[in-house]
Amino acid sequence: MSATDNTVADQDHAGADPGLPDGQQATALKRKDLLGIEDLDVEEINLILDTAQQFKEVSQRAIKKVPTLRGKSVINLFFEPSTRTRTSFEIAAKRLSADTQSISASTSAVVKGETLIDTARNIEAMFPDLLVIRHQFPGAAKVLADTCSAGVINAGDGAHEHPTQALLDALTIRDHKGSLEGLRVVMFGDIAHSRVVRSNIYCLNKLGANVVLAAPPTFMPYGVEALGVEVHQRLEPALEGADVVMALRIQLERGGKLSFPSLREYFKLFGLTRERLALAKDDAIVMHPGPMNRGVEIASDVADGPSSVILEQVSNGVAVRMAVLYLLARSGAAKHVEAVA
Ligand code: NCD
């Protein structure tokens, strides 16, 4: 294989590993951190999606590892419960051969009263390259990014943003529909407490989709129309002609419970059943960021039905996080070369 045949996964280690089939070369992101989709431009979003597309293949290999981030350290700081996102970041870093360390709130010095900035300074003193943070407070990832010279990836900060989730959602939609341009994408449920929705509104709008939100008034943030979305207080009119239907969990831990009388009533009015899904286009896809509450926002037969792409979202999560880790590590490396020159 000649050096010019190298693909994204392998290009830093010419000849060390068989290349990805699609040989498009990625460049670095123009930033140190990924804090939200709001700051990204369309080129950056497409760069991440195109790079993720190439990384997908690594997870299909018998040996699921490329040497791309060998010698780099990635620390995952999870101050909120998480299974899917944390595992996904860990797997992504490991498949790129980075050294990873995960710290969760229950085992960190936070329980001993340490502030986030002190935790950050201490971690910084160990020279990590990238930090992944999930925190209950909006802006926590920004605090870390401002304090540390390592690149910071926001894995969810309170009800603010969850950029890698929106990116993996966009990749999944693109896989099925080719492009997001002009698609009717419906997100419904607990809009008010959802960081997934906020990141998705930015991402989908930037990629040219028509974003439609449906929720009972107590779950709909006041003035959300200003973000360029169509708003409904009932699910049925929102679903009519939909290309993509995304159910959202009620964020009980963020006050969602107080906003409606009972889970049974909620399912009756807002649960995604087969009958309601029939209002969407025949080839509509059903998504959910997880964790799902079956029988609350989504009926089991819809979650497991032929339109569901929920597990594809999880697979795409690993590829998107590989792409983000790779592209941010490269922008750090580019900065280092500039500093030395
Ligand atoms: C989402 C989150 O944490 O914001 N889940 C996830 O990242 N997989 C959505 C949710 O918790 O409902």
Image (cartoon, rainbow, N blue to C red):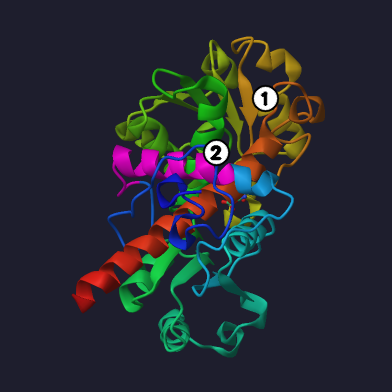
Q: In the image, is residue 264 part of the stretch drawn in magenta?
A: no
Q: Is residue 89 above or below residue 216?
A: below
> Callout 1 environment at 10 Å: few (<14), some (14 to 19), or many (20+)?
some
Q: Which is nearer the eye, 224 or 180?
A: 180
> Of the residues tagged 2 and 1, which is closer to the observer?
2
Q: CA distance from mark 2 to mark 1?
A: 47 Å
Q: Residues in magenta?
A: 38-56
Q: Position of residue 288 (x, y in %)?
A: 64, 37
Q: Secondary structure at mark 2?
A: loop
Residue designated by label 2: 21
Q: Which mark is residue 269?
A: 1
* Disc 2 CB within 8 Å of nearest ligand 1 atom: no
Q: Say whether disc 2 or disc 1 marks the residue closer to the N-terminus.
A: 2
Q: What's under tag 2, amino acid-wise?
A: Pro
Q: Position of residue 218 (x, y in %)?
A: 52, 38
Give the residue displayed 59% in from the left and 16% down from the top.
236
Q: Is residue 182 left or right of residue 336?
A: right
Q: Which is nearer the eye, 141 or 150?
A: 150
Q: In the image, is residue 47 part of the stretch drawn in magenta?
A: yes
Q: Position of residue 35 (x, y in %)?
A: 38, 58
Residue 323 visible? The answer is yes
- Dominant SS of magenta comes to helix
Give the residue displayed 30% in from the left and 49% down from the top.
39
Give the residue displayed 55% in from the left and 63% down from the top.
67
Q: Which is nearer the eye, 154 or 42?
A: 42
Q: Are marks 2 and 1 in contact (CB under 8 Å)?
A: no
Q: Is residue 280 above or below residue 289?
A: above
> Callout 2 environment at 10 Å: few (<14), some (14 to 19), or many (20+)?
few
Q: Secondary structure at mark 1?
A: helix
